[in-house]
Image (cartoon, rainbow, N blue to C red):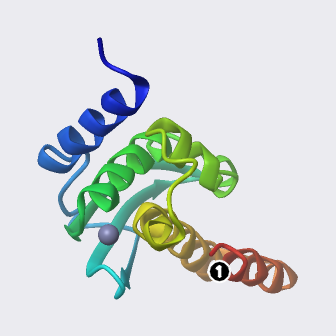
Amino acid sequence: MSSNADIYHEMIIDYSRNPINYGEIKDHDVTFHDSNPLCGDSIDIDMKIDEDKITDIKFHGKGCAICMACSSVLTEITKGKSLDEARAIEKKDILSELGLEHLQAVRIKCALLSLKVLKSALYTYIGNNLKDDKDVGKLKKEAASLY
Ligand SMILES: [Zn+2]
């Protein structure tokens, strides 16, 4: 009999060996890169955005099993969402998918790197395409409070 912990562990190993949405989008509308020097995780996220919808999203780079698994889960969740829906994705949405709610502080950055990159990419895109200037300050504040 397997416990939940074993099932989550298997999911993480599986995702890290066969990541979902792994690759590049050559004609992306926005791309962003960031890294987690504590572990050596380093990823890029590319997105295609049509009107207000994220029609495609891929990530590439290298990372530990937790980073790769969370990037897979995040891109799966994000694909097809509107910009507002994607902005509303929270830490717990990613962590709970893989049973990582009680992860040690050191590994949290591995788990949340992809979310940080996604949000930064969203703010970059929205900032570049925003007609109303006064929203930009609000967006930057939201990005800064991520982790
Ligand atoms: Zn890591």
Instruction: Look at the numbered disc 1 and say if its residue's Cβ is closer than 8 Å to ligand 1.
Output: no
Q: Amino acid at mark 1?
A: Gly
Categorize mark 1 by other alpha carbons within 10 Å: few (<14), some (14-19), many (20+): some
> 112 above or below 18?
below
Nearer-the-camera pick, 45 or 130:
45
At horizontal 70% and vertical 52% (from top left) the residue drawn is 88
> Could you tell whether 7 is left or right of 129 in the image?
left
- In the displayed structure, 107 sits above or below 73; it is below
Q: x, y (%) of residue 81?
A: 55, 42
Residue 37: x and y in percent read 34, 88
- Identified at 44% across, 61% down, the residue is 111
Quadrant showing the C terminus: bottom right
Which of 100 and 42 lies nearest the eye of the viewer?
A: 100
In the drawing, does residue 33 fall left or right of residue 61?
A: right
Where's the N terminus, which quadrant? top left
Locate residue 145, reporting x and y percent: 73, 77
Depth check, front residue: 37 or 105: 105
Residue at position x 33%, y 56% from top? 66
- Measured as percent of width and height from the top left, residue 67 is found at 33, 61
Q: Which residue is mark 1?
A: 127
Specify the quarter for ligand 1.
Answer: bottom left
Q: Quadrant of residue 7?
A: top left
Q: Secondary structure at mark 1?
A: helix
Residue 86 visible, this orientation = no
Asked if residue 94 lies left or right of residue 89, the reply is left
130 or 77, which lies in front?
77
Residue 49 shows in this picture: yes
- Quick one: which residue is furthest to the top in this view? 1
Query: What residue appears at the point 32 percent right and 48 percent down from the top-left corner?
Result: 72
